[in-house]
């Protein structure tokens, strides 16, 4: 099961950190960009090749100290088919290196359309009598706002192909409360979504008592995390908003259970572009080294905070 593979990776690497693979062309070292403009011209192919070369070095630099990576598909999709090819190559390499891959695709639609999304990203697509993999990731993020039928189709592929999903429950953005914090029947909308996730989690329980249906719960709203942990006791939390968006180690403590399981913490910009923060220590060509150092620092910061609060798992 996805969730058991994730927990094993967390134990093995002693790490709850997820590296967000959100490559931004303008932030990628100039020598990489120039190389590909020289080879292909200033076009979509060059942009996509630069993304791929950048990601390759990042994955090689961090694969042994994190359980998973989270490529955000928007950063690839903006470069069209070439960009999606870079996304696919990135996912494949990460898997080859033993990492779990969480495709941040935030999909969700009416049942039949959700089935197509699920088959594209988690399952197989049928071409006559052939079953083929289009994109291959271990889990995806999904948007629950169309209701149960939008999630049901993902559950089918999760069970058939041993995959996972993280449902958007409380997101990290400044206006997330505009809809998510509205009340209905005495409950906040995000709490109602949490109840829905909890129902679905029961269908995919693994050997550690956690399910392959998890939730996105932001580091930027620590007060809500405590309630959400109680509402979704079997769901792993994928926690964005750490670092660049202001979330800190103390803000994510309630996302974990008493034993120190229950959450993986994502950071994208702060890790990928760490080389730009300290130009005296790192040249452009040291971007992988800087990303590794920042990932290690974050891993220790979270482990220490868990330890101090009696929640360290290993
Ligand atoms: O509520 C959410 C859901 C997803 N995200 C995604 O996580 C990363 C965050 O990047 P940082 O650079 O670490 O801020 C990005 O891919 C978002 O799309 C989120 O931030 N909040």
Image (tube, rainbow, N blue to C red):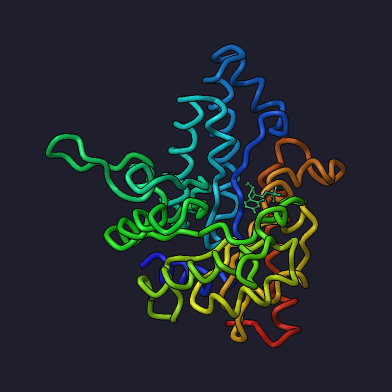
The tally of labels here is: 0
Q: Which quadrant: the C terminus?
A: bottom right
Residue placed at 61% from the left, 63% from the top?
189
Q: Residue furthest top?
A: 41
x and y percent of residue 87 in the render? 49, 37
x and y percent of residue 91 in the render? 45, 45
Residue 264 against residue 151 in the figure, above or below: below
Residue placed at 73% from the left, 43% from the top?
273
Closer to the camera, 182 or 30? 182
Q: Which quadrant: the N terminus?
A: bottom left
Using residue 272 as the reference point, say whether residue 107 is left or right of it.
left
Name the quadrant containing residue 255. Answer: bottom right
Using residue 88 as the reference point, say whether residue 66 is left or right of it.
right
Residue 235 against residue 41 in the figure, above or below: below
Residue 265 in sight from this viewpoint? no
x and y percent of residue 45 in the render? 52, 20
Closer to the camera, 118 or 150? 150
Closer to the camera, 54 or 129? 129
Q: Residue furthest left?
A: 129
Residue placed at 53% from the left, 48% from the top?
104
Using residue 178 as the reference point, say whether residue 37 is left or right of it.
left
x and y percent of residue 146 in the render? 47, 51
Residue 278 in sight from this viewpoint? yes
Name the quadrant containing residue 213. Answer: bottom left
């Amino acid at each position: 099961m996805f969730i058991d593979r994730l927990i094993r990776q967390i134990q093995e690497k002693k790490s709850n950190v997820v590296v967000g693979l959100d490559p931004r062309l303008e932030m990628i070292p100039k020598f990489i960009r120039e190389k590909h403009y020289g080879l292909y011209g200033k076009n979509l192919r060059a942009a996509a090749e630069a993304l791929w070369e950048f990601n390759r070095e990042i994955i090689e630099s961090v694969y042994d100290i994190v359980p998973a990576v989270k490529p955000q598909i928007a950063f690839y999709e903006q470069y069209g088919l070439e960009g999606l090819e870079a996304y696919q190559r990135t996912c494949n390499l990460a898997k080859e290196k033993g990492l779990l891959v969480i495709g941040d695709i935030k999909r969700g639609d009416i049942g039949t359309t959700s089935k197509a999304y699920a088959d594209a990203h988690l399952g197989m697509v049928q071409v006559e009598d052939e079953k083929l993999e289009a994109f291959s990731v271990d889990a995806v993020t999904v948007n629950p706002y169309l209701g149960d039928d939008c999630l049901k189709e993902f559950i089918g592929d999760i069970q058939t192909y041993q995959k996972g999903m993280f449902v958007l429950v409380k997101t990290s953005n400044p206006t997330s409360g505009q809809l998510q914090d509205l009340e209905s029947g005495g409950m906040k909308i995000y709490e109602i979504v949490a109840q829905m996730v909890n129902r679905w989690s029961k269908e995919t329980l693994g050997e550690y008592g956690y399910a392959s249906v998890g939730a996105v719960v932001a580091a930027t709203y620590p007060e809500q995390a405590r309630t959400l942990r109680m509402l979704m006791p079997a769901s792993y939390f994928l926690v964005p908003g750490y670092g660049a968006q202001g979330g800190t180690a103390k803000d994510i403590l309630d996302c974990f259970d008493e034993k120190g399981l229950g959450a993986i913490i994502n950071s994208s910009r702060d890790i990928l572009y760490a080389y730009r923060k300290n130009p005296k220590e790192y040249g452009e060509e040291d971007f992988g080294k800087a990303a590794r150092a920042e990932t290690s620092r974050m891993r220790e910061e979270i482990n220490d905070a868990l330890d101090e609060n009696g929640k360290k798992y290993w």
